[in-house]
Every structure is written in C-alpha cells, then in structure tokens.
Image (cartoon, grey):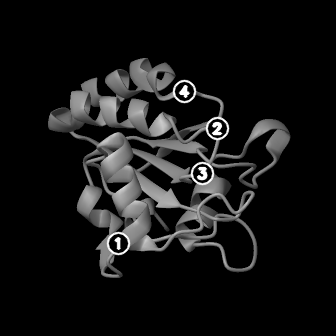
Amino acid sequence: MTSLYNFTAKAADGNPLPLSDYRGKVLLIVNTASKCGFTPQYEGLEELYRKYHEQGFEILAFPCNQFGEQEPGNAEEIANFCSLTYDVTFPVLAKVDVNGKQEDPIWTYLKKQQTGLLGFSGIKWNFTKFLVDREGNIVARHAPTTKPYQLEEEIKALLAR
C-alpha cells in the first residue's frame, strides 16, 4: 500500500529528500509562491514552525509557478526571498507543478487522499495546505484563504496524540 513515506521530494539544491525522513512528525505541506497575495502567510507559517518544531512539527513548502506565474525565480532566488523577507527556517523545496501532466507525484497522492470542496481534487491556488499526522495520514486539506494561525488547534491536537 502506498504511503506518503514512499515518496521522495527534491530539495532546493536538487538532492533527494525522502519523506520517510519525516516519519513520526506532524507535517504541514504547502504549495507556495513569492509574488502572491497570500505570500505574507510565510510569516504565520514560520511562527507555527518555531512554536511547535521542537514538539515534532515540520513544514514542507513546495514553490509552484502554475498560478499567475507568481513564483518565477530559481531555487536560489526563492530561498533568498523566503529567508530575507520572512526569515523562513523550514524547508523550502525545489519548484514543482501541483496540477497537470507534469505534477509532482507527491501532489497527486495528496489530492487523492484529500479532495477539495465538492470533490474537486485539483489545487486551485497557491498556499493550499495539507495536514499530515504522525502516521503519515493526510488528515485535512485547507484552502489558500485559511490563515496559518487557524490551523494551530489542529496541529496541537495532532502533536498531543
């Protein structure tokens, strides 16, 4: 049976990043963009990360340029933007597609596990968020309009399990 831990992401430097490295952690997986109206969510994501990281919380940001071409930079430019603008310390991975023929298999899996409203599985915009429990189950999908602080109670509950 396929699990999230069977997949490997690509780090910003191009090296493989097995998701099995995150076994036992609570994960928030987000598709991000640097030039989006939701980009200030990086600040809230970083606040959550710093607050709960020591308890086993991780965030994986997957930059994506599919929505309004709002993530045009290369890996170095994206990393610099995140670090300098929002002091991001959680992993910002290599740029991926989250929809379509070239979509990353991780995102295919996430969308199959948690569809959106009315059963629509496609990602509609930047900053769609998937919450994963310590066993690798995708337990929630949140719209781009959901602010990071709104996830705090769910995160705390998953960490307490």
In depth, the one of 156 and 62 nearer the eye is 62
Residue occupied by mark 3: 35
Task: Please tell me whether residue 86 is drawn above or below residue 98 in the rendered image.
Answer: above
Residues at badges 2 and 3 in contact (C-beta under 8 Å)? no
The type of residue carrying mark 2 is: Pro
Amino acid type indicated by mark 4: Lys
| Residue 147 disc label | 4
CA–CA distance in space, label 3 to label 1: 21 Å
Per the model, the C-alpha gap separating discs 2 and 3 is 14 Å
What distance separates the C-alpha of mark 3 from that of mark 4? 17 Å
Question: Residue 70: horizontal and vertical position, in percent?
Answer: 65, 57
Is label 2 or label 3 in front? 3
The one of 113 and 105 positioned closer to us in this rendering: 105
The residue tagged 1 is 11
Secondary element type, mark 4 = loop
Report whether residue 72 is seen: yes
**Which numbered disc, 4 or 1, marks the residue that appears first in the sequence?**
1
Tell me the distance, in whole angstroms, between the alpha carbons under discs 1 and 2.
23 Å
Place residue 23 in its image quadrant.
Answer: bottom left
Neighbours of disc 1 within 10 Å: few (<14), some (14-19), many (20+): some
Task: Identify the mark at residue 144; answer none if there is no mark.
Answer: 2
Element carrying mark 2: loop
Residue 35: horizontal and vertical position, in percent? 60, 51
Mark with earlier residue (2, 3): 3
Q: Earlier in the sequence, mark 3 or mark 4?
A: 3
Q: Residue at x 64, y 37 (%)?
A: 144
Tell which circle, 3 or 1, labels the residue nearer the N-terminal end.
1
User: In which quadrant will I find the C terminus?
Assistant: top left
For badge 1, the amino acid type reads Ala
